[in-house]
Image (cartoon, helix red, strand yellow):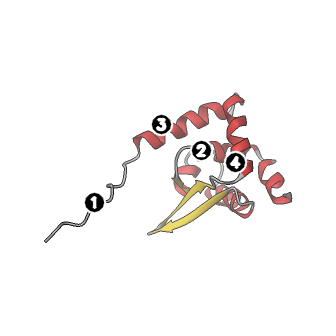
Amino acid sequence: MQRVFEALSSSIRRQILAYLSHAELTAGEIAARFSISKPAVSQHLSVLENAGLVASEKRGQYVHYRLVEDNLVNTLNGYLQDVCPVSRPLKSESASIAASAPRPPEDQPPAST
């Protein structure tokens, strides 16, 4: 629980959680939204991951980050983002990113031969 409170103590980390509320983003996409260095953003992502709030997956040369959906803290944080004047616009931007992201093709049944 200590790690969770430490993770949520930073406004930048709370903003990152808002950006990830609807969309999976790469570390570079997250860093582009802040006026701090990429290593600093990576450190914030590491704290969030160590607290169990975000998960990462390396795909090719990029690391993709997403919220850990079944985490109670993320559920409560999502509710607070809806009423927070700072996080609400970021959450809306996340929804826009998710809506414009290309969708993977749906599973096709195997062709009969």
Residue occupying image coordinates x 77% and y 53%: 7
Where is the C terminus found, in terms of image quarters? bottom left
Q: Residues within 10 Å of mark 1 (few under 14, many from 20)?
A: few
* x then y, percent, for residue 89: 60, 31
- Residue depth check, mark 4 versus mark 3: number of the one nearer the observer: 4
- Residue depth check, mark 1 versus mark 4: number of the one nearer the observer: 1
Q: CA distance from mark 4 to mark 3?
A: 20 Å
* x then y, percent, for residue 76: 73, 42
Which residue matches tag 2?
21
Instruction: Assign a secondary structure to mark 4.
Output: helix
Label 2 amino acid?
A: Ser
Which residue matches tag 1?
108
Q: Say if 99 sits above or below 74 in the image.
A: above
Q: Earlier in the sequence, mark 2 or mark 1?
A: 2
Q: Residues within 10 Å of mark 2 (few under 14, many from 20)?
A: many
Label 4 amino acid?
A: Asn
Please say if the residues under marks 4 and 3 sit with CB atoms less than 8 Å apart: no
Q: CA distance from mark 2 to mark 1?
A: 29 Å
Where is the N terminus found, in terms of image quarters? bottom right
